[in-house]
């Protein structure tokens, strides 16, 4: 087992085949991960994330979110979303949009569901943002340097790609796309950020941006804090 861990952590091994490395542990842990339920996060030291922390593109997408009436986005942000959902949307979308902006893309056409912490849901249904992607989104992410195919066994009917942040196949952004979209020009899917390696990858807290340890990684990976929020 020690040798396997060294192989996973070795940069050359990760660079060669991150998908195969992740698969070696997925089959042994996927069953227990899907059965695990999330835990409520500790009370943050500064549980403040106002609507004004969103940049114009984020605000534009949120303004078209289901249930948001014209001119009411700021009120909906604080009344309809809990802190976990706000952190997940603001942090996750900022990371994905930075990858888009660096290459002149705008592949997120709409946001359809924001999922944060929910102890009643399995981990795969927490901490993600469901979106409508452009027809070119999958090809764009697939072609990014150091990204690779994502093993989407916990997301039936979807395929996707993973960032492999710091050459670790368990870390970073994951983008997913429906395999058989009703409209090929508007592809349903989702994105989330993974923070934990090995068996920690299959726990609900793996995708929780609000988690204290994860948030430190988030800040180092994606350009600092999310507005005034601190866990």
Image (cartoon, helix red, strand yellow):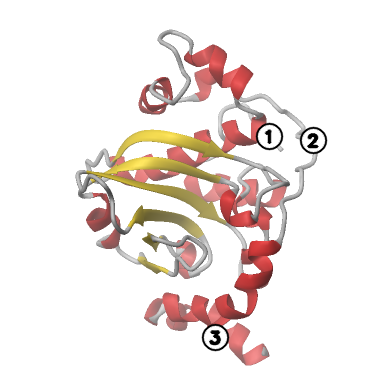
Give the label on residue 185, or none.
none
C-alpha span from label 3 to label 1: 35 Å
Report crowding for label 1: few under 14, some 14 to 19, many 20 or more residues within 10 A (C-alpha).
Answer: some
Tell me how far mark 3 sits from mark 2, CA to CA: 37 Å
Dot 2 or dot 1, earlier in sequence: 2
Label 1: which residue? 230
In the image, taking residue 129 as reference, residue 217 lies left or right, namely: right
Residue at (63, 80) in percent of width and height: 28
Few, some or many residues within 10 Å of mark 3 (<14, 14–19, 20+): some
* Residue located farthest toward the front when viewing the structure as drawn: 182
Coordinates of residue 124 in the picture (x, y in percent) = 58, 56
- The answer to whether the residues at label 3 and label 1 have Cβ atoms under 8 Å apart is no
Location of mark 3 (residue): 7
Q: Measured from the top left, where is residue 150 in percent x and y? A: 41, 66
Name the spot of residue 173 as percent of width and height, x first. Answer: 45, 54
Distance, label 2 to label 1, CA atoms, is 10 Å
Q: Quadrant of residue 147?
A: bottom left
Mark 2 highlights which residue? 43
* Secondary element at tag 1: loop
In the orientation shown, which residue stands out farthest toward the top? 71
Decide: is 28 above or below 217.
below
* Mark in the foreground, 2 or 1: 2
Q: Residue at x 55, y 49 (%)?
A: 220
The residue sitting at 75% across, 34% down in the picture is 44
The answer to whether one can see residue 214 in this image is yes
Query: At 20% across and 44% down in the image, what residue appears?
Result: 185
In the image shown, does 113 or 180 lie closer to the viewer? 180
């Amino acid at each position: 087992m020690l040798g396997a861990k060294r192989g996973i952590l070795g940069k050359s091994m990760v660079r060669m085949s991150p998908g195969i490395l992740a698969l070696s542990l997925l089959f042994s842990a996927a069953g227990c991960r899907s059965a695990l339920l999330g835990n409520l996060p500790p009370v943050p030291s500064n549980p403040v994330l106002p609507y004004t922390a969103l940049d114009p593109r984020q605000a534009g997408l949120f303004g078209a979110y289901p249930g948001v009436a014209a001119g009411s986005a700021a009120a909906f942000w604080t009344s309809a979303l809990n802190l976990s959902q706000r952190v997940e949307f603001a942090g996750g979308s900022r990371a994905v949009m930075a990858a888009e902006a660096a290459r002149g893309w705008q592949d997120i056409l709409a946001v359809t569901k924001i999922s944060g912490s929910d102890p009643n849901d399995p981990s795969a249904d927490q901490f993600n943002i469901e979106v409508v992607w452009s027809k070119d989104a999958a090809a764009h992410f697939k072609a990014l340097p150091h990204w690779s195919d994502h093993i989407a066994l916990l997301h039936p009917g979807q395929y996707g790609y993973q960032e492999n942040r710091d050459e670790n196949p368990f870390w970073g952004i994951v983008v997913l796309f429906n395999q058989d979209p009703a409209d090929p020009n508007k592809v349903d899917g989702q994105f989330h950020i993974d923070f934990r390696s090995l068996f920690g990858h299959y726990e609900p807290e793996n995708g929780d941006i609000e988690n204290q340890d994860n948030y430190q990684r988030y800040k180092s990976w994606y350009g600092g804090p999310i507005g005034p929020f601190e866990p």
